[in-house]
Amino acid sequence: QVQLVESGGGLVQPGGSLRLSCAFSGSRFSIYAMAWYRQAPGDERELVARISSTGVTTNYADSVRGRFTVSRDAAKNTAYLQMNNLKPEDAAVYYCAAIHPITNYDYWGQGTQVTVSS
């Protein structure tokens, strides 16, 4: 059973940076695409970034392109989301997801809170 554990959230001032981590276990990390989503209070969950199983292809929401970078480390079975130049509107609970390559079933982590405030 795939398990995902996010970490790295916290409080940061506008313009600051955070790096979120998503530790993967329970299956073969290298075959899963990984994605980061976020959900602010009262809003729907939105896709922030996605990285293919090989790490070659990445996709970003328009709102974060150029500020956020998604990556993965096969040796550590971990996906990352580097967030730079954070804005108050980036504040949300951030979730990572692992997408099964055949069924497209999404496994989810428990989420990590990101607060952007001065």
Image (tube, grey):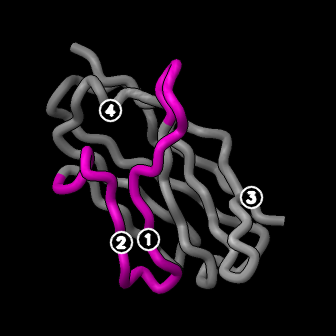
Instruction: Give how far apart the Cα atoms at labels 2 and 1 are.
Output: 4 Å
Instruction: Give how far apart the Cα atoms at labels 3 and 1 are.
Output: 18 Å
* Three-letter code, disc 2: Thr
Question: Where does label 4 land, which residue?
Answer: 90
**Drawn side of residue 109 relative to residue 37, left or right:** right
Q: Along the line of sight, which residue is nearer the eye, 20 or 95?
A: 95
Q: Position of residue 55 (x, y in %)?
A: 42, 80
Local SS, label 3: strand
Question: Where does label 3 land, which residue?
Answer: 3
Local SS, label 1: strand
* Three-letter code, disc 3: Gln
- Please tell me which residue is depicted at 22% across the width and 55% down the height of the picture: 65
- Please tell me which residue is depicted at 19% across the width and 26% down the height of the picture: 14
**Residue 11, picture quadrant:** top left
Question: Where does label 2 land, which residue?
Answer: 58
Of all residues, the one furthest to the right in this rendering is 1
Q: Position of residue 39 (x, y in %)?
A: 51, 33
Q: Earlier in the sequence, mark 2 or mark 1?
A: 1
Marks 3 & 1, CB-CB < 8 Å contact? no
Q: Along the line of sight, which residue is nearer the eye, 2 or 106?
A: 106
Instruction: Give how far apart the Cα atoms at labels 2 and 4 are.
Output: 19 Å
Instruction: Give how far apart the Cα atoms at labels 1 and 4 are.
Output: 20 Å
Q: Earlier in the sequence, mark 1 or mark 4?
A: 1
Which of label 3 and label 1 is nearer to you? 1
Label number found at residue 51: 1
Marks 2 & 1, CB-CB < 8 Å contact? yes
Local SS, label 2: strand
